[in-house]
Amino acid sequence: QVQLVESGGGLVQAGGSLRLSCAASGRTFGTYTMGWFRQAPGKEREFVAAITPAGAITPYADPVKGRFLISRDNAKYTVYLQMNSLKPEDAAVYFCAARTSIIVGTTISEYRYWGQGTQVTVSS
């Protein structure tokens, strides 16, 4: 069992930045692909970014390419999402997820463990 706890959400003005963190329990963190997803009110949860265990592969959803950066620190069992140039449409609850595979995944069904989410609000 892996527990994931997100932090770092909050209110930011459009154009601003936030860094989300996701702390994982368990010594197997370094073997998991990690992902970030988001869900805005009335919308389906969607893929944002992912990172393979060694950090070699990092796919991004088109709307966040060039603005968001995913990274991880396996020694700290933590994955990060640096969000820059935030837009009102980025407002959502952001979820961290763990996939028990070294192969990257971009769909919800590929991730086994999920955090509770952290709210990101972007004012225009």
Image (tube, grey):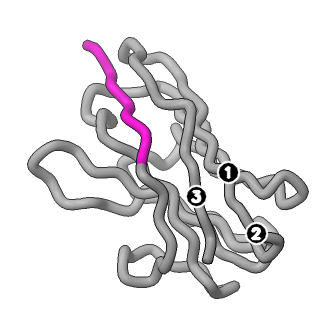
Residue lying farthest front?
1
Relative horizontal placement of residue 84, taking residue 10 as reference (left or right): right
Label 2 neighbourhood size at 10 Å, few (<14), some (14-19), many (20+)? few
- Seen at 52% across and 38% down, the residue is 67
Give whichever of 67, 121 is nearer the camera: 121
Label 1 neighbourhood size at 10 Å, few (<14), some (14-19), many (20+)? some
- Residue 55: percent from left, percent from top: 76, 65
Instruction: Give the quadrant of the C terminus.
Output: top left
Give whichever of 46, 22 is nearer the camera: 22
Q: Main secondary structure of the magenta part?
A: strand
- Under circle 2, the secondary element is loop
Q: Earlier in the sequence, mark 3 or mark 2?
A: 3
Relative horizontal placement of residue 64, taking residue 74 as reference (left or right): left
Q: Earlier in the sequence, mark 1 or mark 3?
A: 3
The residue identified by callout 3 is 4
Q: Eyeballing the image, is 31 above or below 13? A: below
Region rendered in magenta: 117-124
- Under circle 3, the secondary element is strand
- Residue 109: percent from left, percent from top: 37, 82
The residue identified by callout 2 is 26
Task: Tell me the kind of residue under disc 1.
Answer: Ala
Q: Eyeballing the image, is 116 above or below 21? A: below
- Seen at 35% across and 51% down, the residue is 38
Relative horizontal placement of residue 106, taking residue 44 as reference (left or right): right
Task: Tell me the kind of residue under disc 2.
Answer: Gly
Residue lying farthest left?
42
Q: Determine whether label 1 and label 3 are within 8 Å by CB.
A: yes
- Under circle 1, the secondary element is strand
Label 3 neighbourhood size at 10 Å, few (<14), some (14-19), many (20+)? many
